[in-house]
Image: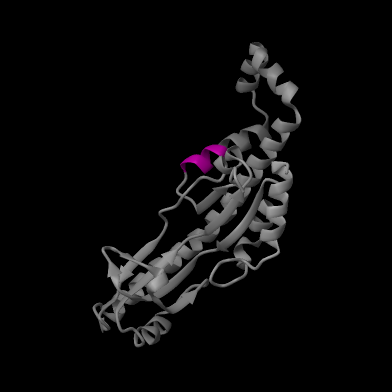
Amino acid sequence: MDRNAEFKRWKAQGLSKADLSRKGSVDEDVVELVQLLNGREQYFTTSSCAGRIILLDGNINGFEVQKQNCCWLLVTHKPCVKDDVIVALKKANGDAILKFEPLILHVQCRQLQDAQILAIRSTHGLEVPLSHKGKLMVTEEYIDFLLKIANQKMEENKKRIERFYNCLQHALEKKTITNSHPKEKIKDKNNSSYTHKKKRNPEACGKCIEENDKELENDDDPGISVTIFPEDY
């Protein structure tokens, strides 16, 4: 079967299922981003999270908490208040960890060049232990301090999602234009005077795309996990 046709079939199967995230649906803050990707023939999303504050109870493995072996005491995609965390901590029997996680998006990509547009990760997170073997190790004042930081990160995360959406939209439009005019692309490479003129006098739209492409490469923005359509699928 033709690989493009096979990918379309795979995509149709994927989109017919519920989002594979713990919530099982797409968060409001990333609906447009998910729709943008799923509207392109070379992508489809399998799981997503717009960002969240969570309180986990489990055992620390080294410096990391394995979420699959933990009890989720609290999870919210909105700003969190201290009282909610204090109530949730009373249920902790192990090592409770407060975490903020930014945008997470899992995307299936048709080819390597499609995945390269999305291959970025983020360190815009927070992970702090609060209790050990059920015993609270910090003060309520410190918890309140941590939540202020986590809530600020949540607001910043929303801005980054919007910026990422705009950058991705420009990058996809640029790729579409390039693919639809391959002969003009070759002509531009062979015409050095034309290329030099374009560099000295870029159009506003072109400049915007270039700046956003650079921002995608260098900015500490959302975490995107991409999977290439396998050769032997």
Identify which residue, 201 or 212, lies in the foreground: 212
Which quadrant holds residue 232?
Answer: top right
Q: Is residue 122 left or right of residue 135?
A: right
Identify which residue, 206 or 133, lies in the foreground: 133
Q: Is residue 82 left or right of residue 161?
A: left
Q: Is residue 84 left or right of residue 35?
A: left
**Residue 40 shows in the view:** no
Q: Write the residue at 69% across / 23% down.
A: 185
Look at the image and say whether residue 216 sits in the magenta stretch: yes
Q: Write the residue at 54% across / 49% down.
A: 226
**Residue 102: percent from the left, percent from the top?**
47, 60
**Residue 192: percent from the left, percent from the top?**
63, 12
Identify which residue, 172 or 79, lies in the foreground: 172
Q: Is residue 16 left or right of residue 100?
A: right
- Dominant SS of magenta comes to helix
Q: Write the residue at 50% across / 40% down.
A: 217
**Residue 158: percent from the left, percent from the top?**
54, 60
| Quadrant occupied by the N terminus | top right
Which quadrant holds residue 179?
Answer: top right
Q: Write the residue at 69% across / 19% down.
A: 186
**Residue 149 shows in the view:** yes
Say if 228 sits above or below 194 in the image: below
Say if 50 sits above or below 178 in the image: below
**Residue 20: percent from the left, percent from the top?**
58, 66
Color scheme of the displayed model: one colour
Look at the image and say whether residue 22 sits in the magenta stretch: no
Q: Which residues are magenta?
A: 213-218
